[in-house]
Image (tube, rainbow, N blue to C red):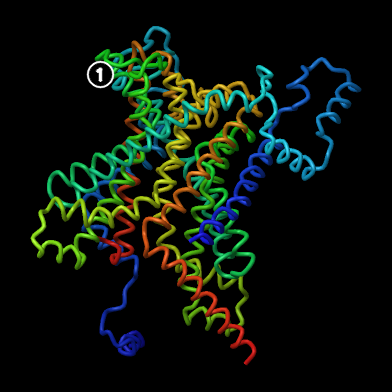
Amino acid sequence: MFRFILKRVLLFIPTILGVLFIVFTINYYTPSDPVYATYGTNLTQEEYEQKRDEMGLNDPFFVQFFNYVKNAARLDLGSSYNNKRPVMDQILERAPKTLLLGAIGITITVVIGILCGIVSATRQKSGLDYALTTISLILASMPNFWLGLMLIIVFSQMLGWLPATGIKNWTGWILPCITLGLGPLANVVRITRSSMLDVIRQDYIRTARSKGLTERQIIYKHALRNALIPVVTVIGFMLSMIMGGSAVVEGIFSFPGIGAMLMSAVSLADYPLIMGSVLFISLFVCVVNLGVDILYGFIDPRIKAQYVTAKKVKKAAARNGKEGSLA
Amino acid sequence: MKNKKADFLLGDGTKKHSQWLDVWSRLRKNPLAMICLIIVILLILVAIFAPLISPYPYAKQNPGEKMLYPSWQHLLGTDNYGRDLLSRILYGGRISLLVSVMAVVISLIVGGLIGATAGYYGGGYDTTIMRIMDILMGIPSFLFAVCISAALGTGVVNTAVAIAITGVPSYARLVRASVLSIKGNEFIEAATALGNTNMRIILKHVIPNVLSPLIVQSTLNIGAFIMAISGLSFVGLGVQPPTPEWGSIMSSGRQYIRDFYPIVTFPGVAIVITLFAFNILGDGLRDAMDPKLKK
């Protein structure tokens, strides 16, 4: 198990470097000129060249990338073109709120999704099953920013129950969290439903039934635990969707998080801030994915066993292959 | 006569017919998917004939008719410049579908080739390529699109490219997996034995055999890309006003949300209908093309 974790963690390093490389490359080709953006446009040619040299912009691409990684490791992502403040400071200031929003969003997705999935599976082909599946599919067809706007129209404008923007108190969190959580619901419902349907037909469920357990015990103690394993695998993907969506949703609700900052950076063409925010959120998603991967190894002993056998099988195959080529 | 002999040799006694006819007959038995297919065809027709069926020119401003609620004259009302919303949404569908199809084609070709070569050649090349694809998938796709779009600039083509890049990894993975599953088959071996080049085998034998998952994925992706494009346009990247695109129409109506709902509401309804149709059709196609999967 330790080797499994170690392998995952080691594989994580090229992933981080890869994400850094992609973000850096995109930034490298942005149409803006960092010198003009930082020092203004009224520089003489000489001053301009000097600043360009100082900022390392005349270095070859890979030298610049190396410096970028070095700085990123020291948590230095440059300064915003717009307000000249370090990007990292601005991100760290806003990160807790965005991460909490994402966490609540994913909780809503997973909890409601699993519940609907169980109900759908246990009452397969009933009206309720069709209704839940259809509603979740309609939710999956809605752009989250539109859902957010519609929720604002209904709950703030028409009913006046919840604030449309800002988070002066906890009520301000409700609409953004619901908006983020409802979109990816369909995936969880679908996976829970089909994996639950699979599990219900297994022999050990029949055994549990014949033991005389109540339906409740069968579903929650025996079936659900096994049915949830495939759901865990998509949590990372769900989170990626939610964190990606949080940018626009935060913008709509004027939520003081990284997403809203990213959206205003987009409208101001503030590239260091755009790249920094995207980098931060991507790395966060990667870390959670790593966690999910490791968790996955823990919750299912079959998977643990599978990893061992897969390795053994591979080794055996390699050995056979060598022997074959020798022969 | 020859065919009969072939059938006899096959030994199953079934009449030989096209795989696509089978798919069609299975799809026809799925009423929801058929309804969605009709909606998709209607959407395509609307996109093509938008200039003929729009009641008003989409850019015609009419200061006297600003922000009217739906009426018989303007079925979906008018926007903040007095332009007919229905016409703008019909034209918007044209742009959304066009950009989305462009993006699907680009990512299909690029991702397909990457995946096919990775799966076919295997080894270090495969590992490297797939690691890169994993990394690309690690970045939330909408943020990735925002990033690329910010670098490339706005406009129809740039938006299609930005969205297409985010779609490449999933195609690469899909094609690679399918290629791996058919690589060991005898007909590939036979083609190699006949002296075909690798590229020819990939194009002539491998790709036709991985077509059905690609069609399913592309149907689903057209929907997903329409959503992403509208998202980009909504945040001010993507397709720029005055070109009508569903996201940009909504974006322009956002500031009036307090007193006037139609500008933000109706383009969204159009997106929901379109996406729903593409999603259900995609699922239906998946079931029709691989009946084993259906539960």
Badge 1 local density, few (<14 within 10 Å), some, or many (20+)?
A: few
Q: Residue at x 61, y 69 (%)?
A: B123
Task: Mark yes or no: residue B123 visible.
Answer: yes
In the rendered view, would you say A95 is above or below A113?
above
Q: Position of residue B185 (x, y in %)?
A: 47, 79
Question: Relative to residue A165, is residue B182 depicted above or below?
Answer: below
Q: Is residue A294 shown left or right of residue B203?
A: left
x and y percentages locating residue A29 in the rendered image:
70, 37
What count of labels does the image hold? 1
Q: Which residue is mark 1?
A: B72
What's the residue at 62%, 50% (across, down)? A13
Q: Which residue, as the protein is rendered here, is positioned at the far front?
A: A2
Residue B39 pos. (x, y %): 30, 43
Toward the top, the furthest residue is B64
- Does residue B41 appear in this view? no
Image quarter where the N terminus of chain B lies is bottom left
Q: Nearer the viewer, residue B22 or A280?
A: A280
Front-lying residue, A227 or A123 = A227
Above or below residue A324? Residue B22 is above
Name the image quarter holding the C terminus of chain B.
bottom left
Left or right of A16? Residue A97 is left
- The residue lying furthest to the right in this view is A46
Amino acid under disc 1: Trp
Which residue is rendered at x = 26% and y = 17% of the image? B71
Q: Please tell me whether mark 1 sits on a helix, a strand or a loop.
A: loop
Residue A90 sits in which quadrant?
A: top right
Towards the viewer: A117 or A298: A298
Chain to which mark 1 belongs: B
